[in-house]
Amino acid sequence: MSEALLILTNLPGLAEAEALARDLVERKFAACVNILPVVQSVYRWQGMVKQANEVTLLIKTAANRYAELEAAIKAAHPYALPEIVAIPIAAGLPAYLNWITAETQKDVNV
């Protein structure tokens, strides 16, 4: 079983979040992406405390796909400094974790 990761990122709107989620799954960088609309973020940016409504993505992937997934998020993300946080999944239903691994395998073109 490959190590599974949960990746978190926030986007400014639902349209951007849906487009990124679909792209990550279609390209097999993620097995599944949950879209959590309208979270309230409070953060410090360029010396000022700011507040914004955002859309959170919960992205499930295999650890061996992380670098490509990170690059895809950075390339599509509208923020200058996107939140991209990877959390190792320490335990879970084995069949589900195996599914994550299977759904994120690179296509082999022979």
Image (cartoon, rainbow, N blue to C red):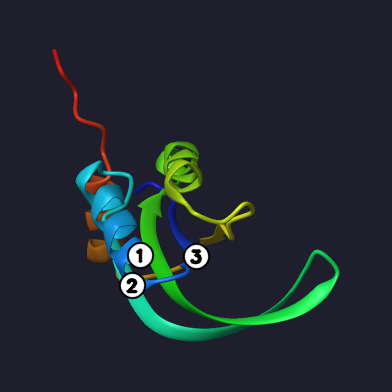
Q: Which amino acid does label 1 sit on?
A: Ala
Marks 1 and 3, how far apart in space? 12 Å
Q: Could you tell me how many numbered marks the image carries?
A: 3
Q: What residue type is labelled 2?
A: Leu
Classify residue 83 as left or right of residue 43: left
Classify residue 2 as left or right of residue 67: left
Q: Front-most of 47 and 104?
A: 47
Classify residue 57 as left or right of residue 90: left
Q: Residue at x 62, y 52 (%)?
A: 80
- The image quadrant that residue 97 belongs to is bottom left
Q: What residue type is labelled 3?
A: Leu
- In the picture, the disc for residue 17 is 1
Q: Residue at x 33, y 72 (%)?
A: 14
- In the picture, the disc for residue 14 is 2
- The image quadrant that residue 98 belongs to is bottom left
Marks 1 and 2, how far apart in space? 5 Å
Crowdedness near tag 1: few (<14), some (14–19) or many (≥20) residues, C-alpha within 10 Å = many
Mark 3 or mark 2, which is nearer the start of the sequence?
3
Q: Name the residue under label 3.
A: 8
Whether residue 105 is situated above or below residue 59 in the rendered picture: above
Point out residue 79 in the picture as x, y percentages from the top left corner: 56, 56
Q: Front-most of 92 and 26?
A: 26
Crowdedness near tag 3: few (<14), some (14–19) or many (≥20) residues, C-alpha within 10 Å = some
Point out residue 65 in the picture as x, y percentages from the top left corner: 40, 40
Q: What element carries label 3?
A: strand
- Can you see residue 104? yes
CB within 8 Å, label 1 to label 2: yes
